Image (cartoon, grey):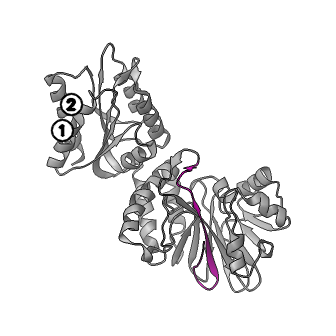
Amino acid sequence: MRKTINDNVTLFRYEKSHDDLFEGCWPIRDGVSINAYCVCGTEKKVLIDYTESGASFDADLADMGLRLEDIDVLVLNHMEPDHTGALNVLFTRCPNIEVYATRLGATETETLYGHKNVHIITNGEELNIGGKTLVFYATPNIHWPDTMMTYLKEDGILFSCDAFGAFGSYQSVFDDELTDREWALLKPETERYYASIVASFSPFVLRGIKALSALDIKVICPSHGIVWRKDPLYVVTWYQKLATYLEGPREKEITILISSMYGNTLSYISNLVQMAKQEGVVVHTVRIPDTNDSYALEKVWRSEAFVVAAPTYEMELFPSMAHTLDLLNRKAVKGRKVLYFGSSLWSGGAAKEFNSYAEKMKLEVVDAIEFRGKGTPADRQRIEDGFKKLIEAIK
């Protein structure tokens, strides 16, 4: 799909199927867009990023009276295959095309695709394409170390690569065109995208935002999601806030992660949810493994506290919950207040494994409770007391 950004800039948008897994692990039940951009000066035509294997923008270029062979420069802000998988075809058809990339991006272009005609950018370097100037800024680890962003100086357009992106497919292209339903999808899908893709690189996000703060940004064109033209600083501020959740402060919310084999652990949850609501505390519940880990990560990332409710399984923590905690640890979730509880029958052991994760993640554990079978009134009271401590700790 092609959409005009202005007289010189065109969006090429490819919609990735909701049946796929993004990066091979994140569900995209509402799809995701892969965005590339064509910038035309009077002397050069530039393509900024490309698309995944099996896709092309030939039809979009044809609508503009162009062919792929008419492109003079290919800017690769980031080498991940969702943006570059189709480069084998491009380089076959355009073997001499000049690529602009970071030093690591140049190495990856050669090792992945055998293309050697790569200009290695220096930070702040400019390229005049005839009446228009592209400026290149290295922004490593947002979210790969090869990443850079490209700024169209005369128009104030920032091609931000994976930064400021989102999951989800939207009929609207621009922020000022979004329907209420699309806004309702954009919020959680932006935060799930951030938590899944960017969270562990949050210090680099803050560093990159600071480095680009002097730019007069009128439009933000990310590689996924919508184009921000009405209020581009809205998404910058949003990402900045998401990045601060790494160290805090975070939202005064509680996420309850639930695994239950036969309902014994699950039977305690509804009462805890009611307790939180009575105290005016926002509470999220995520059932594991029924719900993919990325949705748990999204909610825990924003929450100041969370609960792990999962039984013992063969003398260790329920496997799906252990997998979720491993993901949270990998994605730099740390420093939250947390309560653990879970049922066992012929042995315990889950609390011990939970505590090992808590230590790695520097969590503040208010209690870790194992109970036999359905539990006793004393077990229920201890769990409720632990949950009250969580509520008090975040208020």
Is residue 2 within the magenta segment?
yes
Is residue 7 within the magenta segment?
yes
Q: Residue at x 72, y 70 (%)?
A: 58
What SS does tag 2 mark?
Answer: helix
Q: Which mark is residue 383?
A: 2
Kindly tell me whether residue 127 is visible in this rendering. no
Q: Is residue 22 left or right of residue 194?
A: right
Q: Residue flagged by tag 2: what amino acid is it? A: Ile
**Residue that numbered label 1 is attached to:** 271
State the quadrant of the N terminus: bottom right
Along the polypeptide, which appears first: circle 1 or circle 2? Answer: 1
Relative to residue 13, is residue 9 depicted above or below?
below
Label 1, residues with CA under 10 Å away: few <14, some 14-19, many ≥20: few
Q: How many marks?
A: 2
Give the residues in magenta. 1-23
| Outermost right residue | 96
Q: CA distance from mark 1 to mark 2?
A: 10 Å
Please state the horizontal and vertical placement of residue 161, each as a whole percent of the image.
59, 63
Q: Residue at x 68, y 64 (%)?
A: 50
Q: Is residue 283 left or right of residue 203?
A: left
Kindly tell me whether residue 95 is visible in this rendering. yes
Q: Residue flagged by tag 1: what amino acid is it? A: Asn
